[in-house]
């Protein structure tokens, strides 16, 4: 996979040299190019922003530098043999970035990120490139960053670990919270490692039992506990066909019951603080 990033803060992307993404690059599975948008500015002050039409606070990133940067980035990529680019634009007004979007992007050969600053990019830029390639405006969460660079780091890491040969074994993804499949829509439960006793705290006996069936069941029960506590919306949205008899027992213990449509909701008679 090839990734181009165009930004006014190339140093902000330094973490892409480290850890999983850095290793994927070193292994030749990922080719990352970071470009300084100011290299395509038109004046001696390297200006890339201007005041918003219609008034209001802040500044807007100008069409000129972005257009030339993207034209050059596309030309260089095609020249190097890259194909089928997707433009990924981090913005708080984008579609939610989810594990499903990460999986979709990981199947593409070429991603071009345009992290903005100020009040964002003149909307004609995405309109223009949307006529040439898929454009994904994505939000990594309901909070407001000062710019899109941190979102590029987040998205790149989520995508890179899905690339073939980057994480190692395929099972590593199958049990991820939010991965499709039998663990779908449940958060992962607690984990333990050595030593077996620490500050008076032990390990649940079942994990030392060697009984793989019981261990799997315990882990799933703990996943339900955590999901009910932290993300009850995931239980409410889950396809009840994904729940077996023991899942239903556990949900009942946790105060949840199936409604008329089969979906689970909190049992109002079992409400605790
Ligand atoms: C540019 N402020 C780009 C994205 N999910 C999310 N939160 N905040 C952003 C974001 C904020 C920005 C810019 C200026 C993305």
Image (cartoon, helix red, strand yellow):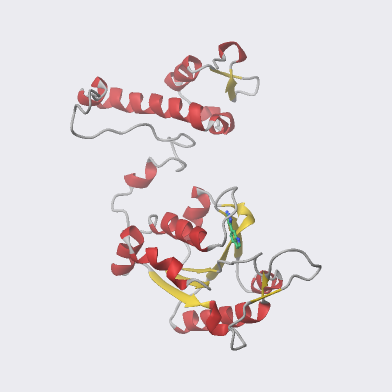
**Image-quadrant location for residue 165:** bottom left
Which residue occupies the extreme top position in the image?
A: 269
**Position of the C terminus by quadrant:** top right
Query: What residue is rendered at 54% in x and 33% in y?
Result: 234
**Position of the N terminus by quadrant:** bottom left
| Nearest the eye: 193 or 171 | 193
Task: State how many labels appear.
Answer: 0
**Image-quadrant location for residue 179:** top left
| Nearest the eye: 60 or 63 | 60
| Nearest the eye: 200 or 163 | 200
Vertical comparison of 273 with 77: above or below = above
Query: What residue is rendered at 59% in x and 67% in y?
Result: 116
Direction from residue 182 to residue 165 in the image, left or right: left
Q: Residue 133: horizontal and vertical position, in percent?
A: 60, 70
- The quarter of the image that holds ligand 1 is bottom right
Which residue occupies the extreme right position in the image?
A: 54
Vertical comparison of 262 with 90: above or below = above
Query: What residue is rendered at 55% in x and 31% in y?
Result: 239
Vertical comparison of 64 with 150: above or below = below
| Nearest the eye: 46 or 20 | 46
């Amino acid at each position: 996979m090839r990734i181009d990033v165009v930004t006014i803060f190339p140093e902000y992307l330094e973490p892409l040299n480290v850890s999983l993404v850095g290793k994927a690059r070193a292994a030749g599975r990922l080719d990352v190019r970071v470009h300084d948008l100011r290299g395509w500015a038109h004046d001696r002050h390297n200006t890339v922003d201007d005041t918003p039409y219609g008034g209001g606070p802040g500044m807007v990133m100008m069409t000129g530098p972005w257009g030339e940067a993207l034209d050059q980035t596309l030309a260089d990529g095609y020249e190097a043999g890259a194909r089928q680019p997707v433009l990924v634009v981090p913005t708080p007004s984008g579609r939610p970035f989810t594990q499903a979007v990460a999986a979709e992007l990981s199947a593409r050969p070429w991603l071009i990120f345009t992290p903005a600053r100020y009040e964002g990019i003149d909307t004609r830029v995405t309109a223009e490139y949307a006529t040439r390639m898929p454009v994904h405006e994505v939000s990594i969460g309901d909070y407001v960053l000062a710019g899109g660079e941190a979102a590029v780091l987040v998205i790149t890491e989520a995508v890179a670990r899905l690339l073939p040969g980057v994480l190692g074994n395929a099972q590593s993804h199958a049990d991820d919270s939010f991965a499709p499949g039998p663990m779908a829509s449940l958060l992962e439960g607690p984990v333990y490692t050595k030593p077996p006793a620490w500050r008076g705290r032990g390990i649940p006996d079942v994990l030392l039992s060697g009984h793989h069936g019981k261990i799997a069941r315990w882990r799933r029960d703990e996943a339900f506990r955590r999901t009910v506590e932290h993300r009850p919306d995931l239980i409410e949205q889950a396809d009840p066909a994904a729940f077996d008899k023991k899942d239903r027992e556990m949900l009942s213990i946790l105060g949840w019951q199936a409604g008329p449509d089969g979906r689970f909701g909190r049992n109002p008679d079992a409400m605790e603080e």
